[in-house]
Image (cartoon, rainbow, N blue to C red):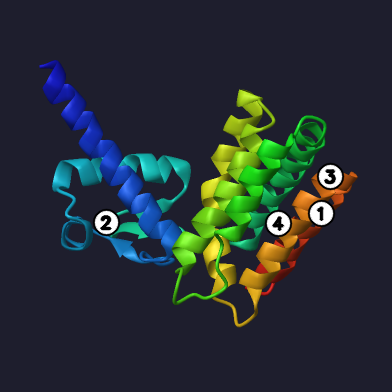
Amino acid sequence: MRSSFISYKSLKMQAYHVLKEAIISGTLTDHQMLTERTAMELFGISRTPFREAVQILEAEGWVYSLPYKGIYVSPVNLKDFEEVFELRLILETAIVRKVASRLDETGFAVLERMVESMQTDSAAQNDYDFTSLDFAFHRTLNNMADNRRLLAMTEQIYDVMRRIGMRVLRRPIARREEIIREHRKILDGLRNGTAEAAVIEHLERVKQLMKHE
């Protein structure tokens, strides 16, 4: 009985994560209808896990339902971004302020390796993987603040930011090069006391690009 319950819960959460990542990556696009058939054909998700996953996704704002019509992928709009941006600005400046006072050479080396793993060539590293590395850098930095409540708050907004990041990367600009430079500037700032300014500059650039989305 216990084993069956765990398997059941696991299927529901697997379906939830697969569908959410498909929305983040752009595999499922804004306002696209999401049906049981689509979920089965694209992702191998069966009826019950699909229905239960959709309930969670709708509660979190990833999809919306129209009576007698169906379930659709929620779009990201400027207001969504501005709300997330405000939170991220408050949280991440507080984080780098705290991390700067405690980061040692081992920590610097970890962050440096993460930046070095980000590639400018989209043929060698696709947008989804690049964006995942981008936010892995920020998550690692956040972990170094050693404040689990602060970390939990950033995690709530990072999936939305990854989705936005995917869109920005598709714009005809050298955004990959910019992100890598901005991350290096944050690293330099952690050494010389300008990390908060570097984080603000990094986030303001994303905001500027999103306004033209």
Q: Horizontal and vertical percent for residue 111?
A: 64, 47
Q: Horizontal and vertical percent for residue 131?
A: 53, 59
The residue positioned farthest toward the bottom in the image shown: 172
Q: Quadrant of the N terminus?
A: top left
In the rendered structure, which amino acid carries the disc numbered 2? Answer: Tyr
Ranked by sequence position, the earlier of labels 2 and 1 is: 2
Judge depth for marks 2 and 1 and give the one in front: 1
Relative to 203, say whether 10 is above or below.
above
Nearest to the observer: residue 7 or residue 80 = 7
The residue positioned farthest toward the top in the image shown: 2
Whole-Å distance between the Cαs marked 4 and 2?
47 Å
Whole-Å distance between the Cαs marked 3 and 1?
12 Å
Whole-Å distance between the Cαs marked 2 and 1?
49 Å
Judge depth for marks 3 and 2 and give the one in front: 3
Relative to 102, say whether 115 is above or below.
below
Q: Horizontal and vertical percent for residue 190?
A: 81, 44
Q: Which residue is mark 3?
A: 191
Q: Which residue is mark 2?
A: 68
The residue positioned farthest toward the right in the image shown: 193
In the rendered structure, which amino acid carries the disc numbered 3? Answer: Arg
Q: Secondary structure at mark 2?
A: loop
